[in-house]
Image (cartoon, rainbow, N blue to C red):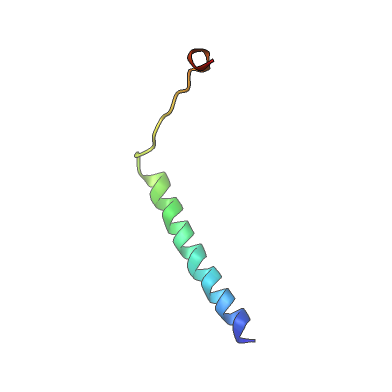
Amino acid sequence: MPCSAVTLSLATITGIIATALLAIAFSTDNWLYTEVKRAQIQ
């Protein structure tokens, strides 16, 4: 069963990194606002 232990530890590390990146994303104001004018495209 060493494969399941490796998978569990990788999933835990990935979950921690994902949570940290989400916290950074929501705490910063570096979001881009994109406006698409469809009338000019067509």
Is 13 placed above or below 42 here? below
Q: Nearer the viewer, residue 19 or 2?
A: 2
Residue found 65% across the figure and 86% down from its top = 1
* Residue 2 image offset from top left, x and y in percent: 60, 86
Task: Give the camera-side residue of 14 and 19.
Answer: 14
> Could you tell me which residue is drawn at 38 percent across and 51 percent down?
24
Percent from the top left, x then y, of residue 4?
Answer: 62, 80
Q: How many marks?
A: 0
Q: Is residue 4 above or below residue 12?
A: below
Residue 11 in picture, x, y percent from top left:
55, 69
Answer with left or right where residue 26 lies relative to residue 15: left
Residue 20 position, x and y percent, is 42, 58
* Extreme-bottom residue of the structure: 1
- Quadrant into which the C terminus falls: top right
Residue drawn 42% across the image and 45% down it: 26
**Furthest residue toward right:** 1
- Residue reaching furthest to the front: 42
Check the image and report above or below for 42 versus 9. above
User: Where 28 sits versus 40, above or below?
Assistant: below
Identify which residue is drawn at 52% across, 13% down.
39
Left/right placement of residue 29 relative to residue 17 reads left
Please indicate whether residue 5 sits to the left or right of residue 18 in the image: right
